[in-house]
Amino acid sequence: MDKSINIGSKIKSVRTLKEITFDELVERSGLDREEVKRIEENEQIPCLSPLIKIARVLGVRLGTFLDDQQELGPIVTRECDCDNEINFSNGASDAKKHMLYHSLSKSKAGRHMESFIIDIVKEDKQSYSVSSHEGEEFIYVVEGEIEIIHGKNKYQLKKGDSIYYDSIVPHHVHGSNGNAAKILAVVYTPA
């Protein structure tokens, strides 16, 4: 089940509820007007960076768009619960999907971290652009090998390796040499 089709509708709903106009959202987020329109109309699979900026303007956590529930207490996610995907683009102009996100915390209300198992799809032709957003990220390689561009540096990580970095620095995560991989990622965004 592709959850990306609901993200734009949730953004529009929260924006309307908070009485923030489309123009205010564009101006305060610093995003391109056409990009915000495509995201709200579910015509573009958004990458994480603009979603975080939109969430900040609307005064909500990223999880509000991803599948918040009101359940209190700890949340247990079983392996079979990870079949649902949340898709973001890789920032490339053709908005193709290069990562399939499986949320591990979608039912936890009031969370400040987003945890995912991410399947990085094999790519014959790699095209990407770096992005940045407030917060921090932790990545642990479960299968395969990945390359992370962080600022002017590149890091190669193999199965069992991990990295923790400030996500305000422009960055990008992809499979080494375009190969598939699987990672555990935890994204923290300040409230």
Image (cartoon, helix red, strand yellow):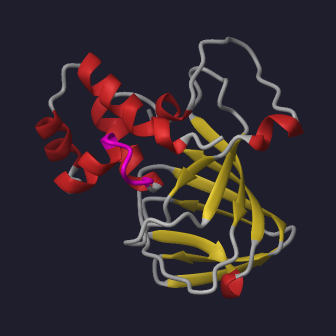
Quarter of the C terminus within the rendering = top left
User: Residue 34 falls in which quadrant of the image?
Assistant: bottom left
Q: Which residues are magenta?
A: 40-46
Residue 136, x across and y down, in percent: 54, 52
Quarter of the N terminus within the rendering = top right
* Residue nearer the viewer, 53 or 36: 36
Count of number-bearing discs: 0
Q: Is residue 190 visible?
A: no
* Left or right, residue 80 beside residue 71: right
* Residue nearer the viewer, 164 or 64: 64
> Is 103 covered by the magenta stretch?
no
Q: Is residue 109 visible?
A: yes
- The residue at 53%/33% (across/down) is 63
- The residue at 42%/53% (across/down) is 46
Residue 87, x across and y down, in percent: 56, 51
* Left or right, residue 43 beside residue 16: right
Residue 20, x across and y down, in percent: 18, 26
- The residue at 77%/42% (across/down) is 83
Residue 84, x across and y down, in percent: 70, 40
* Residue nearer the viewer, 87 or 163: 87
- In this rendering, is residue 181 above or below 31? below
User: Residue 161 falls in which quadrant of the image?
Assistant: bottom right
- The residue at 38%/32% (across/down) is 9
Report the magenta stretch's main SS: loop
- In this rendering, is residue 51 above or below 67? below
- In this rendering, is residue 149 above or below 191? below
User: Residue 129 falls in which quadrant of the image?
Assistant: bottom left
